[in-house]
């Protein structure tokens, strides 16, 4: 099933990584513009599940790289961009294993694929901000960097009702003090970094991605992965199985750190 899903997703895919329940509930919000016209032939738009607001963790540093080391959980975080078929295949693999992930979406990807916001949230996953255009944010002037953060935040707010749970800077593992300050100004108490880099954006193949993650992950780890790569889709089930064998489970970043 996995190979079929990955192959189908890969066909015609736009490989674009980071490198140069379903029922209405009190958290549901309507898409911008309100309900559509009533009457024959005009169905009301379905509610969109609201994203969690930005996570605040008292006692944690402004820039978070990992969660508690004395627990039994890890967070798999995905830089969000690429062919939606691959994203759906990956989310489906996570859900079949009972795992929940965090997707840090790029704003212009949400412009192209607005339905992915609902898909991520309806799967029980977490959604956050990975800038508007995925520029080298730490090299930008303050005004441009702030526009990258708030531009994606605006997309998330329109689609989900909040600016998302986390901000992760683009093209860098750690934010500069300036970018950290700008993220806080935009409404994000923390910047989300990571302590495990899967290197999957280099397309080394599923086996290499699996090996890199499982050889470096430990309790509390925040793992960096990417949507839009067939090797990542294929690597996810054995990664989740390897975590399970160690008594670890994949949870959202908010669950990990709170």
Image: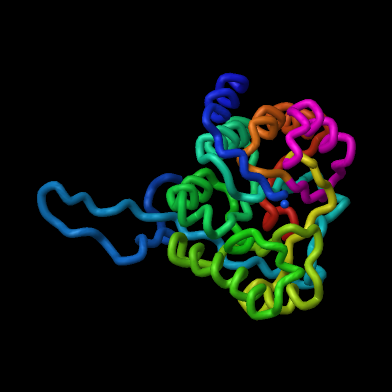
Residue at (52, 57) in percent of width and height: 108
Residue segment shown in magenta:
201-224
Colour scheme shown: rainbow
Rendered position, 19 above or below 60: above
Residue at (69, 50) in percent of width and height: 18
Q: Quadrant of residue 180?
A: bottom right
Rendered position, 179 above or below 66: below
Residue at (76, 39) in percent of width and height: 202
Q: Quadrant of the N terminus?
A: top right
Q: Position of residue 121 (x, y in %)?
A: 51, 50
- Pick the residue in front: 149 or 13: 13
- Pick the residue in front: 20 or 80: 20
Q: Position of residue 193 (x, y in %)?
A: 78, 59
- Residue 204 is a magenta residue: yes
Q: Residue 100: in sight, yes or no?
A: no
Q: Position of residue 57 (x, y in %)?
A: 73, 68
Residue at (59, 53) in percent of width and height: 126
Residue 236 left/right relative to 218: left
Residue 178 left/right relative to 10: right
Q: Quadrant of residue 245?
A: top right
């Amino acid at each position: 099933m996995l190979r079929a899903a990955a192959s189908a997703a890969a066909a015609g895919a736009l490989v674009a990584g980071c490198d140069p329940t379903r029922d209405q509930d009190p958290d549901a919000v309507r898409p911008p513009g309100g309900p559509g016209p009533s009457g024959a032939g005009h169905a009301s738009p379905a509610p969109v599940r609201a994203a969690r607001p930005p996570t605040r963790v008292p006692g944690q540093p402004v820039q978070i790289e990992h969660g508690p080391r004395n627990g039994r959980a890890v967070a798999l975080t995905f830089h969000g961009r690429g062919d939606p078929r691959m994203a759906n295949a990956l989310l489906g693999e996570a859900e079949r294993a009972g795992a929940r992930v965090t997707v840090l979406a790029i704003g212009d990807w949400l412009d192209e694929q607005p339905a992915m916001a609902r898909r991520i949230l309806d799967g029980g996953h977490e959604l956050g901000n990975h800038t508007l255009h995925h520029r080298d944010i730490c090299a930008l002037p303050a005004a441009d960097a702030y526009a990258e953060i708030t531009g994606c935040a605006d997309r998330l707010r329109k689609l989900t009702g909040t600016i998302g749970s986390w901000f992760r800077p683009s093209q860098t593992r750690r934010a500069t003090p300036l970018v950290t300050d700008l993220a806080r100004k935009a409404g994000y108490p923390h910047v989300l970094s990571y302590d495990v880099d899967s290197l999957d954006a280099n397309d080394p193949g599923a086996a290499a991605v699996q090996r890199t993650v499982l050889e470096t992950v430990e309790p509390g780890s925040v793992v960096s992965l990417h949507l839009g790569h067939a090797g990542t889709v294929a690597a996810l089930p054995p990664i989740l199985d390897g975590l399970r064998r160690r008594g670890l489970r994949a949870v959202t970043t908010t669950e990990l750190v709170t």
